[in-house]
Image: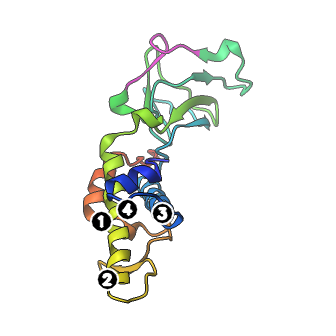
Amino acid sequence: MIIATQDLAEYLDLDTADDQLDGIRSAVEAACVQYAARPFEATTRTWYLDGSGGMYQFLPEPLASAPTSVHVDTGRTFGSGTLYTHGTDYVWRDTFAQRLQSLNSYWTEYAQDVKVVGTVGYAAAAMPADVKLTVRREAARAYNHMVQRARQGGDVAMTEAIDDADVDYFDPNLDVLLSKAAKLVLNRYKALPLPI
């Protein structure tokens, strides 16, 4: 969860949060995750990667911190003798959170011989403020649309036409749920495709 439903209720100056507001928050968060192609909540990942054969080993998603463990083993048993040490064998930097740099030589070049365990996403206390604000703003926009439709006596179904597309606010598979401003914020967090 990027933000709590009660936080959204307070942002909207509402006394309480209800299921409908929770649904809006959940749909917006799902759209953010889909657009960025990465989780925002802290999640542990284990990857078995093909060795790059170069100075850098690229990761499918950016890590939140240095990997928990990195093993390189052409035999793919990944025992203690294959463990690489951060700062000695490789380095991870948050400015390039989606790659590991070899310090001794090049990474191996075999199929699935690099095992990386690490955390992607953020703990609740470390969630980036701009991501939380984006979710609040986009959820508030959806909520205000619903309220406006109800006041006009119209259907309060959570749909709206945006950029020549019909948007269903409870369908997280539509990235058009997000405004252009939200996408600009989320572009900073997008996972990059792995180099070929």
Residue 164: give its label.
Answer: 2
Nearer-the-camera pick, 88 or 42: 42
Q: What stretch is highlighted in magenta?
A: 84-93
Residue denoted by label 1: 179
Residue 27: give its label.
Answer: 3
At numbered mark 1, what does the secondary structure look like: helix, strand or loop?
loop
Establish if 152 lies above or below 188.
below
Crowding near pointer 3: few (<14 within 10 Å), some, many (20+)?
many
Residue appearing at x 38%, y 82% in the figure: 150
**Label 2 to label 3: alpha-carbon separation:** 20 Å
**Amino acid type, label 4:** Ala
Foreground label between 4 and 3? 4
Crowding near pointer 4: few (<14 within 10 Å), some, many (20+)?
many
Crowding near pointer 1: few (<14 within 10 Å), some, many (20+)?
some
Residue appearing at x 40%, y 49% in the figure: 7
**Amino acid type, label 2:** Asp
Residue denoted by label 4: 139
